């Protein structure tokens, strides 16, 4: 059988694409055809159109890339891993067995407001038309694979998708790549890691404020972000230009003791899954679908009331208790191999697709 997989090169979602391609279960009798959407072609004619907003250019580029990929069909099924709005106008998708994975619905993105810069139309009638179109599209899929129960609830409550079409399956990580090192030790000197391309939205400033105010000692903080920031604090090191699955990034995870992500707005957390897989206790704020990522009190701490004070309480407890860090590290790795192994989750997804067509 020949399946088309429409994947994204966007930050975060690129990791999902790499995991799918690297862990595809070829023994299930499926020939995968990868349609990779870049949203941008340097020097392309679309990108050089004068007076056209960037988001329109990216949509046009995506539409062309998807259309060109679908011409390689026919396909027995199509798996969509880009935002539904990018694919909704392709008639081909409505004529075949289509499936989709998503970390958020448009309604939920709108609820985040300024954090993602996504808003409903100012014209109520136009927004109603868009909503009905999204409802129709979601319900046309043979199956939907939301990453979290938060996203699954929106599909049901906001878009009327029946429960029997919804299968909550996180994207997972390569647990062989993201694994603890055998030589890892848990001394009093504690290495804390933050990974967030969007420094401000991911709560980077709260981390800086914490570093200035905390009474905790014997810690060092590594910040991985694409934002260029200058910090005059010898306890903090900033790392730029580390891409998805970069070996240097993996090494940072493996050499750390705590993963901290006081994010202000998030749909899920791939970085959180990577941290768990490397055997790190995770301190994570509750927003969007992050409530599914860790088991509060067992593999880390989930902060429902995000503040410097609440963050300091959780992190300081871990810094001062090496035995607790070790216990959570073991539980984190076990949980990751059970729930977040990409190879297992991809195989499970494919089997559900095969049963549905």
Image (cartoon, rainbow, N blue to C red):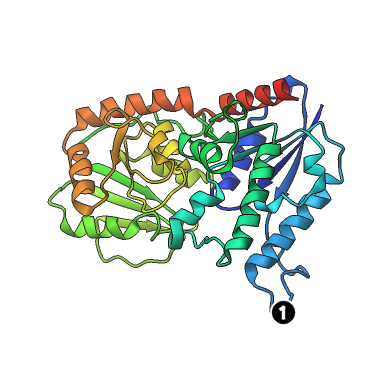
Determine the image quadrant of residue 99. Answer: top right
Give the total of numbered labels. Answer: 1
Given residues 281 and 297, the one toward you in this image is 297
Given residues 23 and 300, the one toward you in this image is 300
**From what the image shows, is residue 200 above or below residue 93?**
below
**Residue 3 horizontal/vertical position (percent):** 77, 33
Residue 46 visible at all: yes
Q: Which residue is mark 1?
A: 50
Q: Is residue 288 left or right of residue 37?
A: left
Quadrant of the image containing the N terminus: top right
Determine the image quadrant of residue 274. Answer: top left
Q: Is residue 174 left or right of residue 94?
A: left
**Residue 253 horizontal/vertical position (percent):** 40, 41
Q: Residue at x 18, y 38 (%)?
A: 317
**Residue 172 horizontal/vertical position (percent):** 52, 33
Quadrant of the image containing the C terminus: top right
**Residue 153 horizontal/vertical position (percent):** 49, 37
Q: Residue at x 58, y 46 (%)?
A: 13
């Amino acid at each position: 059988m020949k399946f088309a997989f429409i994947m994204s090169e966007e930050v975060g979602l690129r990791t999902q694409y790499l995991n799918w391609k690297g862990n595809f279960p070829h023994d299930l009798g499926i020939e995968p055809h990868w349609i990779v959407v870049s949203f941008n072609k340097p020097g392309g004619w679309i990108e050089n159109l004068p007076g056209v907003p960037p988001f329109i250019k990216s949509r046009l580029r995506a539409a062309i890339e998807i259309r060109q990929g679908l011409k390689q069909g026919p396909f027995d099924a199509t798996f969509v891993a880009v935002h539904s709005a990018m694919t909704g106008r392709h008639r081909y998708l409505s004529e075949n067995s289509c499936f989709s994975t998503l970390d958020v619905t448009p309604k939920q993105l709108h609820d985040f407001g300024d954090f993602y810069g996504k808003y409903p139309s100012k014209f109520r009638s136009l927004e109603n038309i868009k909503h009905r179109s999204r409802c129709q599209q979601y319900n046309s899929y043979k199956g939907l694979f939301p990453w979290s129960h938060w996203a699954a609830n929106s599909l049901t409550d906001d878009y009327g998708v029946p429960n029997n079409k919804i299968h909550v399956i996180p994207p997972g990580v390569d647990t062989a790549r993201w694994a603890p090192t055998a030589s890892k030790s848990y001394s009093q000197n504690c290495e804390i890691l933050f990974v967030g391309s969007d420094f401000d939205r991911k709560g980077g400033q709260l981390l800086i404020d914490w570093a200035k105010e905390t009474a905790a000692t014997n810690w060092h903080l590594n910040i991985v972000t694409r934002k260029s920031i200058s910090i005059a604090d010898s306890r903090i090191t900033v790392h730029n230009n580390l891409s998805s699955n970069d070996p240097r990034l993996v090494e940072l995870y493996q050499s750390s003791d705590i993963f901290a992500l006081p994010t202000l707005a998030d749909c899920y957390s791939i970085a959180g899954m990577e941290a768990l897989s490397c055997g790190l206790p995770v301190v994570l704020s509750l927003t969007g679908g992050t409530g599914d990522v860790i088991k509060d009190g067992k593999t880390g701490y989930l902060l429902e009331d995000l503040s410097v004070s609440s963050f300091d309480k959780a992190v300081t407890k871990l810094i001062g208790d090496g035995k607790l860090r070790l216990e959570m590290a073991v539980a984190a790795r076990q949980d990751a191999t059970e729930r977040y192994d990409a190879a297992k989750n991809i195989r499970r997804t494919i089997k559900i697709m095969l049963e549905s067509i």
